[in-house]
Every structure is written in structure tokens, then in C-alpha cells.
Image (cartoon, grey):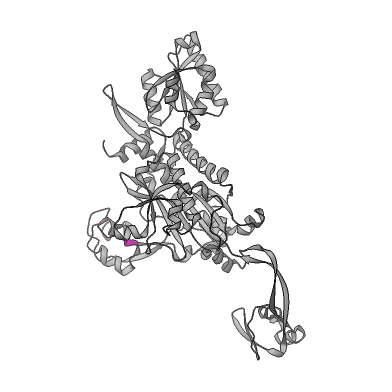
Amino acid sequence: MADIYDNVIELARRRGFVWPSSECYGSVAGFIDYGPLGAMLKRKIENLWRNFYIIQEGYYEIEAPTIGVESIYIASGHVKGFADKMCQCPHCKEYHRADHIAEEHGTPGADALSIEGLKDCIAGLPCPSCGESMGEVEVFHFNLMFKTGIGPGAQRTGYLRPETAQGIFTDFNRLSRFYREKLPFGAVQIGKSYRNEISPRQGMIRLREFTQAEAEIFIHPEHKTHPAFSRYADYVIPLWGQTQQMAGDAPVTTSMRGAVDSGLVANEYVAYYIALTHEILMSVGIRPDRLRFRQHLPTECAHYALDCWDAEIYSERFGWVETVGIADRTDYDLKAHAAESGDAFTVFIPFTEVRTEERRRILPDMGALGPKYRGKAKAIADALSSAEPTEKGATVVVDGKEYFIPSELFEIREETVEVRGEEIMPHVIEPSYGIDRILYCALEHAYDEEEVEGEIRRILHFPPPIAPVQVAVFPLVNRDGLEGIARSVTEDLTTHNILTQYDDNGAIGRRYRRQDEIGTPYAITVDYDTLEDHTATLRDRDSMEQVRIPTDALYATLEGLISGRTRFADLKNEE
């Protein structure tokens, strides 16, 4: 088979899956349009994801704006640190990621190199665009966020969000109340994110506007046993941990229980979502021998992450492609937003029994503080409540300035108090899915060719639940009442929410080939026997086998096939 990428992209463009965006104006790298079948395929993948995270897991979906005020991204660290190392070719003036140039010429882990290290590494390497030697080029940081102004005269600075997660974090306190302030709880979001990539040259794998599906699960920091872990405890998949990678060993095939017990995976929550992600990707049609879960190496793992794994899918063109990240992000995000906003991003957790504690309370003498500190008196009194006083007094900080408060201006009182619970800042488990990358990999893994009667038959072997068109209906000929019966069958199936396409154009064999090419799993042909015995031919895309089904049983049969409760081979055996 020729380069599968070229074949997949040619089919995708010709059949209306994916097109270059604004093609009539020359298009711009990093942007794509989903055509009629591509948009439907994308929605099917998103809804399959929702079935797992909303229906199975019980996490509600929210929708936050794609533009956020600057404070959000100051807190998240994106304003300061969300940058790639860039260089400009002195010959063709094209911009490139310096670490990508280095990696393409045999330097592993180039993204971890310093600016100076990358500069030395790429000196003399050829430019990816013009082929000339890069020479002694400057390497510098380039922030990937799209910046914008909010309001007339750009009164406030805003950014197009680089990830969907921050909207969930900033809504934390509302979500906590929605879930009655009980841990664990979670929220999900599917939507557009934006990254101003330097030189996207990987088609659907690296886009400037892309769709993410993310879940943020808030859990007690000391209780990381998943309440439904038994669902995936015995789920067995290969895991490529840090130890295996650094030793050059193969992945370890283990159950999720074994992975947690051995310390390969940090806790049950991370292991649970590794297994759930594997199940989702299998449902999308990713081949199991082309899927691996790789743990981040110490040089890759974010400083705040307790554990992080990537689901990587193998592509014939791009090699191993990161499509899903699963991380225990600890309390990093909530702590950052609490510090920036001044809000308390905590949940009150009641104790099983009321406790008594000896506490020291500082009572400021407002009659003395007021005249002495005037407008600062209230702020100083508030700061005293958390101060550590000595015999002489206490030092507090108000508006960045230190004040020493003599001991005669406050009273220290020892009290016995009842404590009914404590404020907890949860840890966050984050599974993050790149929908566009998953969709491309599903296309590539579904694509197949074979020769049938001297012609090339191209097939997309989509699983029936995600196929853009699930059933095609053909009248054998467009006369003698066959077209009326075929249209009636089509109407009945669409009434039952099965996406059905009626096609009476051309020879029956050509119609089959057209449907195979777009991945339609089943086709119904109404022929002259239908007039006699009220049955129709049901054809299976993958085996090309056919069975006769009563027309009044078509919906029930197809519903069973699409849901997976029925196999086509079982229908053959019943004939």
C-alpha cells in the first residue's frame, strides 16, 4: 500500500471528512474545516466520550467561554511560562521550533534543552523549509497564546484559552455547591482551545484551533482509592513506565490492581482513568497493537504532577502520537487560583465525630488600634488573627508593609472549641483528550484497501456506533415500486434515530463501494423478491456477506447490530 497518510487524506477530502480551511484564499496551516461526514464523525466520537464520562461516571458537563481574562492565565502560569523555543531561518525567514529541528536530526528530548543548548545543537542543521544551513541563529521563547483585547479600546487584556480546564477550575466553588460540597466530584467540558503554533506541519495532529475533551475530578488529597475501582481492577493492558523506558525494556502487561500495588501507577484514580481511556479508544476503533500508555519521564513530568501518563497511538506517518494525558495534578491549580483571586478554593469536610481543640484567639483592642493606625486599623486587626505573637508583640503585613503591634494593643485568650470538620483543598485528577488527533488516528486505523474483481476496494472499518452514516438503503432499480419501499424503509429507520442514507444513483456495486469508502457498516437492498416475500438484503461492510431480513424486522435487527448486542455472523447462522 502506498503512503497511508496520503491515501487517508485524499479520501477524507474527496468524501467530505476534512478540508483545508478557507481554501479559496490559500488556507493557513494549523486550521481545518470538517465537512459533512467529518463533522458527524467528530460528534459521534464526542458523544461516545460523553457516554463514558457523563452517563457512566456521572460527571456533569459545563461550558465556559473560549476567551478568558488575563488574571486566569497569570494564575495558571500560561502568561509567564506557556512558550516554545523558536528560531528564524536566516535564508527563507521561516520560523521553526528549534527543539523539533534538533529532534528530527537525532537529539532525543530536545524540548528539555536550554536556549543555549538548543542554539548549539541546531547550528549547521538544515532548515526544514529551504534546506539551507541554519547557522548561528538566535533561539528565543514564543508564547503560544492568542492575545486579544476585551471591550472598546481593549480596556482589559484577554486570551483565547489554550486549554478547557481553566474554566472548570475557576468555577470550582460553584461546582462544589452544586455537588453539595461532597468529595469526590467532577466536571467535564468539550470545546475549542487555541495555541498559536510556530510552524504546524503535521496536518490534523498539530492545529492552532482544536477540540479538547477534559474532565477535572476533585478528590480528597489523603483518600485516593476510587469508589468504583473494581470496575477496572482486573483490566489488563501494557504500561510503559519510567523504569522500563530508562532501562530500554518493553512495556509491562499488568492489571490495574497490579499496577497500583506495585507502585507502577501512583494511585487508583490514575489507574482507573488509564483503563477507562483504553476502553474509549478501543470503542473508537484504535487498534490495540498500535496503542500504548507511557509514563512521563522525570524530565517531562510537571513539577507539581504526582503522576502523569500519555495514551499514545501509532501513526504510519507521524509515529507515536500523544492523544490523551492522564495526570494527578495535586492541588496546584486550585492553590494558584486561590492565591491570585483571594477566594478560598476549599471544601468543608465534616468529621465523623465532633472534636474539641485548645485554640489561642487574639482579640485586638480596637479602641487603641483605631486612633493609632486609623484607616489601616481594620486590616491590621484581621491580620492579627493569624499572627504568631511574642511576649513583646506581633508583626503583621498589610498591603505589603510590615507593622509591629505591641502586646498591650491586643489580648491573647486560650479557648476550648468544638471542631466539626476542616477545610480541604482537593487534589485534581485530569484526563485530557485531543479529539482531533483521536479522529485522525481513527481514520488511519480504519482505512484499508483490497482488490476485488480487478478493482481496488477502499474501506473505512469504523465501529458502527461512530460511523457517520450507519445504514444505506438502495432500491435495486428505480422503478416498479422498489423506490417507494426503499424510501419507506429509510423513513422508518430515521424515525428511530438511525442515521440512514438513501441512494439510487448508479449500479448497485458502485453504490456499495461508495458506502464502504465512507465507512457505512450496513446496507439494505430492496429488490424484486421484496415485492413477493417482504424481505430485503442486509449486507455487512466488513465481510461483504448478505442475509435476507423481513422489512418489518430491519430496525430491531440493525439496532442490535449497531449497539453490539448482535453479531452479523449470528444472523448468518440463523438463515
- Quarter location, residue 261: bottom left
Which span is picked out in magenta? 105-111
Q: Name the residue rendered at 52%, 17% in the picture.
A: 551
Q: Report if residue 109 lies within the magenta region.
A: yes
Q: Estimate the x, y position of residue 438 in percent, counting from the top left.
A: 42, 44
Q: Residue furthest right?
A: 367
Is residue 29 visible in this depiction of the protein? no
Quadrant (top left, top right, bottom left, bottom right) of the C terminus: top left
Q: How many marks?
A: 0
Quadrant (top left, top right, bottom left, bottom right) of the N terminus: top left
Is residue 570 visible in this depiction of the protein? yes
Q: Name the residue rendered at 45%, 28% in the picture.
A: 567
Q: Estimate the x, y position of residue 241 in percent, counting from the top left.
A: 37, 57
Q: Estimate the x, y position of residue 248 in percent, counting from the top left.
A: 29, 57
| Left or right of residue 253, residue 180 in this image | right
Q: Name the residue rendered at 72%, 90% in the picture.
A: 408
Q: Nearer the viewer, residue 379 or 252?
A: 252
| Secondary structure mostly taken by the magenta-highlighted segment of the chain | loop
Q: Residue furthest bottom?
A: 392
- Residue 352, compared with residue 499, is above or below; it is below
Q: Nearer the viewer, residue 429 or 374?
A: 429
Q: Nearer the viewer, residue 534 or 318?
A: 534
- Quarter location, residue 245: bottom left
Q: Nearer the viewer, residue 96 or 496?
A: 496
Q: Report if residue 126 lies within the magenta region.
A: no
Q: Estimate the x, y position of residue 25 in percent, counting from the top left.
A: 40, 43
